[in-house]
Image (spheres, grey):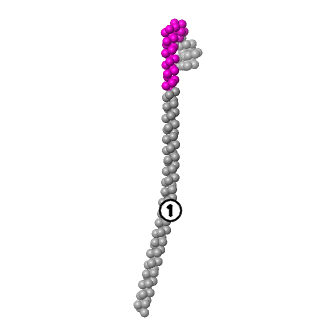
Amino acid sequence: MQAKLIAALVIALAFAVTIGFAYHYKLAAKDAVAAKEAAERSLNTALDVNADNEKTMTALANAKARESQLAADLAGEVEAANRTTLSVAKALADLRAQNADVDAYLKQPVPDPLRGMYDPARAGGGR
């Protein structure tokens, strides 16, 4: 009888240990599924952030390209204005050298009211 009792206890103990291991693996599997879901959410968040960063970098690159083009256009306009100004100054110098009346006219002082429109600080007198 005692042997049957010991055998029953061993079987019950084996059954309890098996149930304990099964419960442990069930909890471990739940934790693994939760960790997998958290990793997937983290990956999706990282992919979304990466996509936003790429959009921002593309927008910045486009803005830099537009800025460079505007700077080049402005430099071209400044160069054209400088060429025009130099050609007008050369034509005026040639005209003054060839025509004494023009030279005499340009040597006259600028009236104070007119000078004040262009240079208020020097409107008091002089040339």
Residue 120, horizontal then vertical, whole percent? 55, 19
What residue span does the magenta drawing correspond to? 78-107
The residue lying toward the viewer, choosing from 121 and 98, is 98
The residue lying toward the viewer, choosing from 67 and 110, is 67
Q: Main secondary structure of the magenta part?
A: helix
What residue appears at the point 49 percent right and 21 percent down from the top-left corner? 83
* Amino acid at pointer 1: Glu
Q: Which residue is mark 1?
A: 37
Residue 107, horizontal then vertical, whole percent? 52, 10
Q: Is residue 57 magenta?
A: no
Residue 24, horizontal then vertical, whole percent? 46, 72
Q: Split into 4 quadrants, where in the image is the N terminus?
A: bottom left
Q: Is residue 82 magenta?
A: yes
* Residue located farthest toward the top when viewing the structure as drawn: 100
Q: Is residue 104 visible?
A: no
What residue appears at the point 47 percent right and 77 percent down from the top-left corner? 19
Vertical relation: 39 (above or below) 66: below
Q: Is residue 121 visible?
A: yes
- Circle 1 packing at 10 Å, graded few (<14), some (14-19), many (20+), is few
* Residue located farthest toward the bottom when viewing the structure as drawn: 1
Residue 56, horizontal then vertical, whole percent? 51, 45
Vertical relation: 82 (above or below) 69: above
What residue appears at the point 44 percent right and 87 percent down from the top-left corner? 8
